[in-house]
Image: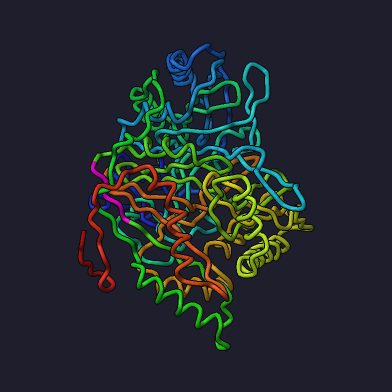
Amino acid sequence: MAAALARSSGRLMIPNAPSSSAQHRYRSCRLSMNGCGGAGGSDKAVGVCETRTLASVSAAELAVPQLKLAVSALEANPPQSDSGIIRLQVPIRQRADALEWLQAQSQHQVLPRCFFSSRGQSLDLTSLSLVGNGGGLASTAKADGDEQELVSVAGVGSAVFFQGSYPFALQDWQSIKRFLCKDCPLIRAYGAMRFDARTVFAPEWEDFGSFYFIVPQVEFDQLQESSMLALTVAWDNNLLWTWQKAMDELKATLQQISSCFGRLRKLDPKTAIISFQHFPSKGSWDISVKRALEIINGRESALVKVVLARCSKYIIDTTTDPLVLLASLKAESQNAYQFYIQPPGAPAFIGNTPEQLFHRKCFHVTSEALAGTRARGVTKAEDLQIGQDLLFSPKDNIEFVIVRESIRRKLQIICDEVHIEPSKALRKLPRIQHLSAQLSGRLRDEDSEFNILTSLHPSPAVCGLPTEEARRFIKENEMFDRGMYAGPVGWFGGRESEFAVGIRSALVKNGVSILVFAGAGIVEGTIPSLEWEELELKESQFTKLFQYQNPMVCHQKAKGTTSTAN
């Protein structure tokens, strides 16, 4: 089913074991692949890294038979290397939806699944200076000789997966990197990391670990004008995960892949919320915000900003596939990244995030600052007025400048030069608008994803400033585990890498329970009630999908206890 690669300081999952925490089994070894360890582990690149493109087909259902023939041919003439990764891909001369394809594979709950989509190459920016760049999956793929940009990617199964219960470290990045190469740009590791790996894991987040990345076994790529279906096989004899084991797992997964898929399924509009509970409650929120403001306004702490978050638990009356919920969010995905990550048998982490953490291609890196929030106006005139209010709000400007200047300083550590253009603009999303700035720089070292990632995360947009003071306040005052909410979510590749910030997100636990996350920045001048309204606005992309039928509202009495009232 999958191949695992991780360090012994984490806990390693044995192959084909269900992902439920009650059924985990672990083995201690320095380096492991699919639960198999050996003394020959290395951080050096694997011996073979190849992409083989097969003849194109006219429709998606014709790609699977062609790949099966290619797998048989590959098995008959195996590579001679002790380690490697090979991608077989079939261009499809028909544009098909990657999310539709993934929905057709939704019966395979024992296999890990993932989905990532770009936010497009142009952003809706409004300011005195209308210059900026977008973000997306960025790489191009050849389809019948034409270079086309990748729009979205869906994956099932894992040729290699990387997971740990400790903070993501340089050795973990090196373990991922050895399976990536510049000549195979579409071999990528997709996944996410916790906001803070040093905090205690809540049960709902245990299956993700502190980081979780997969190179999909079977992958559907949606391009601008066409599509592509691909298989990936990875092996390392030194880690006792042989070529034959890897091929057996790939063939088993391929047998489960559906060749046909229908129209995109969306949420039943009659689906209703029957109960909900906020962590913290409104009263507890006000207390935490006032406590933060006392510290910010005091003289004994360096804290100037902290981002406090809320987790809202919604129970709905109908079992819902998280992929159906994600499809229903597509209307909100304009100018945003969409993502879906689900380890085998685990909850699904889904979201539409507007915020790029970074995009790296060769020596060029981009990032952005995002802060300050307002609703969109009903009319153009109202929308313009609200936007102008945000642009010239002293409180929001303080919050925004803190974020922008912090990111600039962090980029200056790893870049020879940093540019900010525009320095302040409005980012307009379907329901919300933010203050935004685009930053770019030239890296001193092309191979520096780990340094970029650890420098930029967590940003003041989701944590605060100074980072450690803000992180400490969050740990002591928030009443829930953020998990991967507000953590990096994205992909590593051989030529380039891109990560977004995992906000505007939810954890779909069992089809009827949905945990929705939202946060707000607390700075000098913050009014607690207005920040609570901001949380409601940010959560509304999820809650607007459901009806409210006299839901049971749970009111918090104290940490860990609740009472209920209609």
Q: How is the structure coloured here?
A: rainbow
Q: Position of residue 476 (x, y in %)?
A: 40, 75
Q: Residue at x 64, y 47 (%)?
A: 359
The residue lying toward the viewer, choosing from 151 and 40, is 151
Magenta region includes residue 179: no
Q: How many marks?
A: 0
Please tell me whether residue 93 is drawn above or below residue 564 in the rendered image: above
Magenta residues, start to end: 313-317
Farthest residue toward the bottom?
A: 300
Q: Residue at x 29, y 39 (%)?
A: 271
Please tell me whether residue 133 is drawn above or below residue 184 in the rendered image: below
Q: Position of residue 323 (x, y in %)?
A: 38, 36
Q: Position of residue 169 (x, y in %)?
A: 52, 59
Q: Is residue 374 left or right of residue 314?
A: right
For the N terminus, the quadrant is top left
Q: Is residue 312 left or right of residue 83?
A: left
Does the rendering let one see residue 7?
Answer: no
Farthest residue toward the right?
A: 417
The residue lying toward the viewer, choosing from 532 and 96, is 532
Corner quadrant of residue 309: bottom left
Q: Residue at x 44, y 40 (%)?
A: 329
The residue lying toward the viewer, choosing from 242 and 503, is 503
